[in-house]
Image: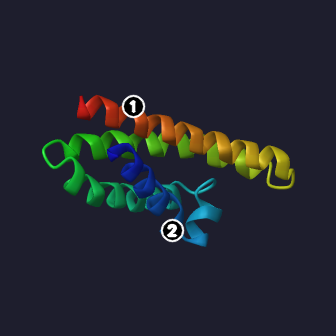
Amino acid sequence: MTFSLFLFAHWVGDFVFQTNKMALNKSRSLKWLVIHVLTYTFIIALFSLFLLPVIALQFVLINGLFHFFTDFFTSKLAAKYQVNLRIFYLIIGFDQFIHVITIYWTVKWFIV
């Protein structure tokens, strides 16, 4: 159940609270990437306080860092293929796959 709740938190942080400005600029501006990742990390932190209160800080930092590095590369790659929607959505799907795997392994690591 914890994994499912963190997937929901990921969706909220990565999609619901990501503004158009963040989405459009994170591939070419470190400032907007950092703003996006801090927003995402804040949402993950809120969920962590309730789900993993003893180890929340470590969990949040690891997920925030992995989110930054994943988006750093995938957003730049996706921006290059905005005109080729098939490739663009393959990259977005792969980006989400990496995020889900990261959440899975960090939840598994911290809950065991």
The percent position of residue 57, horizontal first and vertical second, equals 21, 46
- In the image, residue 97 above or below residue 25: above
Q: Which amino acid does label 1 sit on?
A: Trp
Residue at position x 29%, y 29% from top?
A: 109
User: Residue placed farthest to the right in the image?
Assistant: 84
The percent position of residue 58, horizontal first and vertical second, equals 23, 40
Q: Residues within 10 Å of mark 2 (few under 14, many from 20)?
A: few
Q: Residues within 10 Å of mark 1 (few under 14, many from 20)?
A: few
Helix, strand or loop under label 1: helix
Q: Report which residue position mark 1 lands on.
A: 105
User: Residue placed farthest to the left in the image?
Assistant: 54
Q: Report which residue position mark 2 lands on.
A: 16
Question: Is 77 placed left or right of 49 in the picture?
Answer: right
Q: Which amino acid does label 2 sit on?
A: Val
Residue at position x 51%, y 55% from top?
A: 33
Work out whether residue 93 or residue 28 is closer to the camera in this orientation and state it. 93
Give the Cα distance between marks 1 and 2: 23 Å
Instruction: Answer with the quarter of the image where residue 40 lies.
Output: bottom left
Residue at position x 46%, y 63% from top?
A: 12
Helix, strand or loop under label 2: helix
Answer with mark 1 or mark 2, whichever residue precedes in sequence: 2
